[in-house]
Amino acid sequence: MSLWPGRSSRCCCVTVDVVSLSGLRYTAHMKGVLGYLAIGFLVATAGCASTRVIPASLEAQVDNAVTFGHIVASPDPYRGKIVLLGGEVLRAKVMQGGTQLEILQLPLDDDQEPERDRLQSKGRFLALHKEFLDPATIVEGTRVTLVGEVTGASVEKMDEADYRFPMLDVKHLHRWDRKRDDQPRASGPWWGVFGGVGFGGGGSRSGGGISIGF
């Protein structure tokens, strides 16, 4: 009889220890998850903060009242205006004064990224990048956002018809990453089946920028 209380006591002690140990493990697991959440949040917000399509030095110079529709209708009155445009590169041609881009204009979304629907285009324009830009690095289909100075218009052949192209000198060119264009633009946290956690911050919001001194 005297052995049972001791044995029962030892069982209780073991049970309590297991429960305590499980609680510690659970607490440690939760702390780890919260740590991952905090790190993920900081990385996501830091990435958003560092993404700038247009340099701050140029933002104040852009005349947001001038639209592409204004320039297409009558380019000459807007000579010297600094505008923000976007679209899809149709052709790049090396010239003596730099590299000329023929661009299909597309509206910009809230992140200054060109829309993908070509039916929204209001026409084409020519943008002269005054420094050499290898056409192999900006092939047909590359989507761009640019700050440019309106320089007038040029009448050139498009197939068998004459077409008046508005012309700009490029001040800054941002190329969007084609490899990530088809990825979903996830945002917010996601949870894995086995306890993983991560953050999305706009899958296709990436690219590179080139500025021209002026």
Image: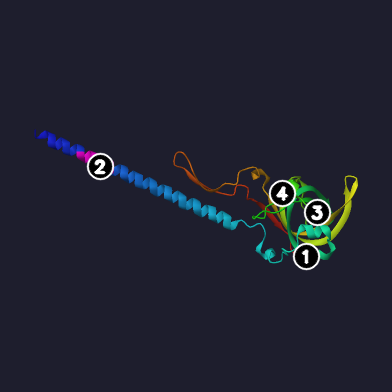
Q: Is residue 214 left or right of residue 159?
A: left
Residue 138 seen in the figure: no
Return the x and y of residue 122 as percentages of the image width and height. Answer: 78, 52
The residue pinned by badge 4 equals 143
Q: Could you tell me which residue is drawn at 78 percent across and 51 percent down?
A: 103
Badge 1 crowding class, 10 Å Cα cut-off, few under 14, some 14 to 19, many 20 or more, is some
Q: Amino acid at mark 2?
A: Asp
Badge 2 crowding class, 10 Å Cα cut-off, few under 14, some 14 to 19, many 20 or more, is few
Could you tell me how far apart the alpha carbons at marks 3 and 2 are, in whole angstroms? 75 Å
Q: Could you tell me which residue is drawn at 14 percent across and 37 percent down?
A: 6
The residue pinned by badge 1 equals 81
Q: Amino acid at mark 3?
A: Phe
Q: Could you tell me which residue is drawn at 31 percent across and 42 percent down?
A: 22
Q: Earlier in the sequence, mark 1 or mark 3?
A: 1
Q: Could you tell me which residue is drawn at 36 percent across and 47 percent down?
A: 28
Q: Quadrant of the N terminus?
A: top left
Return the x and y of residue 160 as percentages of the image width and height. Answer: 90, 45
Q: Earlier in the sequence, mark 3 or mark 2?
A: 2
**Magenta-highlighted residues:** 12-19
Task: State yes or no: residue 82 in magenta.
Answer: no
Badge 4 crowding class, 10 Å Cα cut-off, few under 14, some 14 to 19, many 20 or more, is many
Q: Earlier in the sequence, mark 4 or mark 2?
A: 2
The residue pinned by badge 2 equals 17
Could you tell me how far apart the alpha carbons at marks 1 and 2 are, in whole angstroms? 76 Å
Q: Is residue 9 positioned above or below 162 on the image?
A: above
Say which element carries label 3.
strand
Say which element carries label 1.
loop
Q: Amino acid at mark 4?
A: Arg
Could you tell me how far apart the alpha carbons at marks 4 and 2 are, in whole angstroms? 62 Å
- Tell me if label 4 and label 2 are in contact, CB under 8 Å: no
Q: Is residue 149 positioned above or below 26 on the image?
A: below
The residue pinned by badge 3 equals 125
